[in-house]
Image (tube, grey):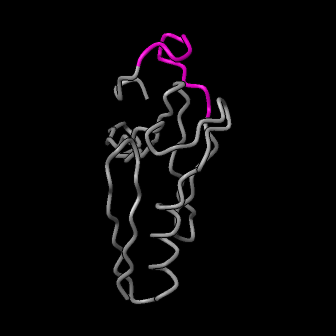
Amino acid sequence: MIVKGNLKVGGALYQFEADEKEDLLAILKVVGIVNIRQECNICNKGTPEDFQFYAYKKSSDKGEFIFVKVRCTCGAVSSLGQYKSGGYYWKDFEEFKSKGGKENQTKSTDDF
């Protein structure tokens, strides 16, 4: 089954699609991604224009990892988590701290 979903973030519309043999698994994947937190629990902002979407890949001695995050205009960050059994969920927004330990100083994806 193919399931499609849309997500509006920061003035852009993103389209997601999952093609799985099991219908519920396809639904689980798309619903988890497009159901982003509706409000930042740090500053209480909650319109799509208040958020910006980021995705990047990092390599380490443990392997390659893909990170998907949403940043609020206040600087807080919500990360996409993945269940071991499949499917995705959005974590609560957290105050962002750069590598130097300073809160909300930069919006560079290199510091995530």
Rendered residue at 55%/12% (across/down):
101
Q: Main secondary structure of the magenta part?
A: loop
Which quadrant does the C terminus fall into? top left
Residue 105's x, y, as percent?
47, 13
Lateral position of residue 104 relative to residue 67, left or right: right
Rendered residue at 41%/58% (across/down):
7
Residue 16's x, y, as percent?
34, 66
Q: Is residue 62 above or below residue 74?
A: below
Residue 69's x, y, as percent?
45, 42
Lateral position of residue 101 relative to residue 10, left or right: right
Residue 28's x, y, as percent?
52, 74
How many numbered circles does the render carry? Answer: 0
Q: Is residue 68 above or below residue 103?
A: below
Q: In this view, does 71 lie above or below 13?
A: above
Rendered residue at 58%/50% (across/down):
37
Rendered residue at 66%/31% (across/down):
42
The part of the chain drawn in magenta is 94-106
Which quadrant does the N terminus fall into? bottom left
The magenta stretch spans residue 99: yes
